[in-house]
Image (cartoon, rainbow, N blue to C red):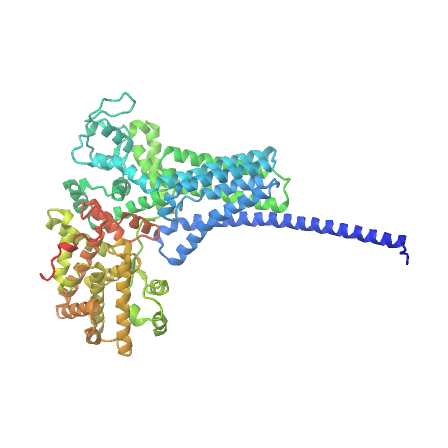
Amino acid sequence: MVASFSPLSDLGCSCSGSMDSESHSLSKVLKDFALLISVEWQVRILVLISMLLQLVLVVLGPLRYNNSSGIFRFVLWGAYISADAVAISTLTTMMHNGGSAIYGIWAPVLLLHLGGPDAINAYSMADNELWLRHAFNMVYQVSVAVYVVYSSALEGHALASAILLLVAGAVKYGERILALWLGTYSQIVKSCLPIYKFMKEGNVVRLSGYVVMGEKQVQKMIEKEGGAPSKEKGDIEPGTEASSLEGKGIVTTNDVKDHTGINEEDYNLCLSHALFKMYKRRFANLRFEEGIREETEELWVNNLGGVKAFRIVEIELKFMYDAIFSKWRTAAFSKWGVVVRLLNTTLMGIAGFLILKEREYREAQRLVTYVVISVALVVEVFQLCRIMISDWARVNLICARIDEIKWCRNCRMKVLEIAVLVLGKVQNVAGGDTYRSTGIQQHCLMETCLNSSPCVWWIAGFLPKDNFVVNGYIKAMHIHKVSLQEELKVFIFDILKKKISDLKGRREIQRIILLGIIRTCTELNDHCDNLEEIILILHVATAICDMKRVSLGEEENKNVRLSRILSRYCAYLLLSRPNLLPLHPDMARLTYLELVERLLKIQKSTMGVLGKHSHPQSIEKVSVEAKTVLAAATNLARRMLDQNEDERWKSLAECWSGLVLYMGCYNKATFHAECLATGGEFLSQVWVLLGHLGCGEQSDSAMKVKAEVPKGVY
């Protein structure tokens, strides 16, 4: 059979193949178009998200110094981590899907975002140590931005604005790297060496007061001791008297104090700044030679007193926070930093003006561009204003006003005088006391165990003792903050003043304090080698005495208030900040949880007799069967309850104050600095105060005096 061929059938096959080909090409075009649309919208969304993250950091960044809320820290941490990731992801998307002209404008704006806000340059000290990684990342991201601008084929005003934004973004990114580098441990130690050499005993060059400005000149003075005089302009000959150093770039606290027109607030600010520069030696474990001098004791003990001393320390810690975690040190305390910031703001303003003239972009692209550029410019102006009213700028202006020969002549002197006055007024209205402590954290172990739901502890019974769920629940639900009263600062300062007057050598203050506590509370004698046990014994005993006072309807006096606040604060430190204390954090946590477990077993066996309103005699009755820490706490409480009420609370208040001073003697510099980024701690203020007075050890070794405390003596 012969096969037949039909022309119509061939034509039908041909038409069918042509239709399939056209359909395939059309679907490919639609797919490519949809992909192009999705990429463009993806970039738009990412750019807007990056802008929103920057706004969150700009708004929340300055607040974290006084905010210890866990939710606040989580939001800020999430924004800080996400900001760089989103900006880098957007730049990468632009590079791989280039060709759009608008990308040439958006890429430099993302460099501004990568530069970060001034108030939160680093989230932790570990970020500063990674400055070299950030520097390599900067080189790569700037290269990507340049490539995107080049591939976008911009012309005219658009190209000029892109170049201006590119320069501004690269400079701001570089400023971030510089601030990270200056906040590293090695640079902090290096920056304190000139002051350390200057303040050492036996130095032939002396200045009256502490150095506020002019460390480089001081370093020249030291380097030229015993060497040939240099011919450089402005150098200072060795052995120069303090009275002849005016106008050569060195400003001391005595210059500020003696200068007419400087009020007490400005003097306190300059004194805090000078002390901050000196206190950086604690990071290098360098000794405070001036701490044992009569002038130091005269300043802190006699001239300042309790409230003013802690006020100076608060401002000093704010300077320390800014130097480690923000850009304000680099941007506000050098003339080049201010000039660079003004130049950057000007470049961004010119670029924004040029972009407004462009009409060739689509409506959506133009809208996103206007929003992003406007927000970036507003943020830059806002941060520039904050720099101008910062404490760093104020100290710089005060020093420039005093150093007349170098900075001020005739009308310039009057301009600086007006600038200092206006800046002080604006700072009080706009900034307020951002360095003032707002409260002190509290945690009561007894309330945690006795007032929590039984279901919670039933579930916790199936988990390990050191499980993060149990620790997280206790920290989240049973820690609160109370206002930090001035009477607490005055009381601790008075105790410190008394201890100093009784001592010949301040290096032994830890041993004397610990011996005094054990002498008062003999039940601590068997536990003197474990600070965590001392804290828990005193804490439980104080809680039992307070419950007794409430049940008898006794009034609350000053010593009761201070004992309760310090007791709960030390318990909080043991639970949440063990790294600040001279003990092993893991052992402290296990000791705490073991005591919680014992209290819960007692509560369960007595069917809730240890309730919130139970009588303290019930607690004593059931607790006597317990061992170790709980037994010692019960015995101590029983003996305290036998004493006179006034004597009892006076002894407890002095014990707790001594314990806080004891813990503040140890140099946990890195951990104290980390705490500044999470709301700060009152113990950090005590640590700084004791350091300036030369009290305690200059290293962070834990409890060296344990072996010196005799057991069974008292």
Q: Nearer the viewer, residue 138 or 289?
A: 138
Residue 407 visible to an observer of this rendering? yes
In the displayed orientation, state which residue is furthest to the left: 713
x, y (%) of residue 77?
A: 42, 52
Q: Nearer the viewer, residue 12 or 671?
A: 12
Residue 664 lies, with reference to residue 425, above or below; the image says: below
Residue 466 lies, with reference to residue 676, above or below; the image says: below
In the displayed orientation, state which residue is furthest to the front: 1
In the displayed orientation, state which residue is furthest to the top: 231
Choose top left, top right, bottom left or bottom right for residue 482: bottom left
x, y (%) of residue 666?
A: 22, 50
Q: Nearer the viewer, residue 166 or 335?
A: 166
Residue 349 visible to an observer of this rendering? no
Q: As drawn, is 305 to the left or to the right of 6?
A: left
Q: As drawn, is 677 to the left or to the right of 3?
A: left
**Quadrant, the C terminus:** bottom left
x, y (%) of residue 331?
A: 39, 38
Q: As drawn, is 687 to the left or to the right of 124?
A: left
Q: Residue at x 61, y 39 (%)?
A: 101
Choose top left, top right, bottom left or bottom right for residue 271: top left
**Quadrant, the N terminus:** bottom right
Q: Residue at x 73, y 51 (%)?
A: 24
x, y (%) of residue 139?
A: 47, 37
Q: Nearer the viewer, residue 62 or 73?
A: 73
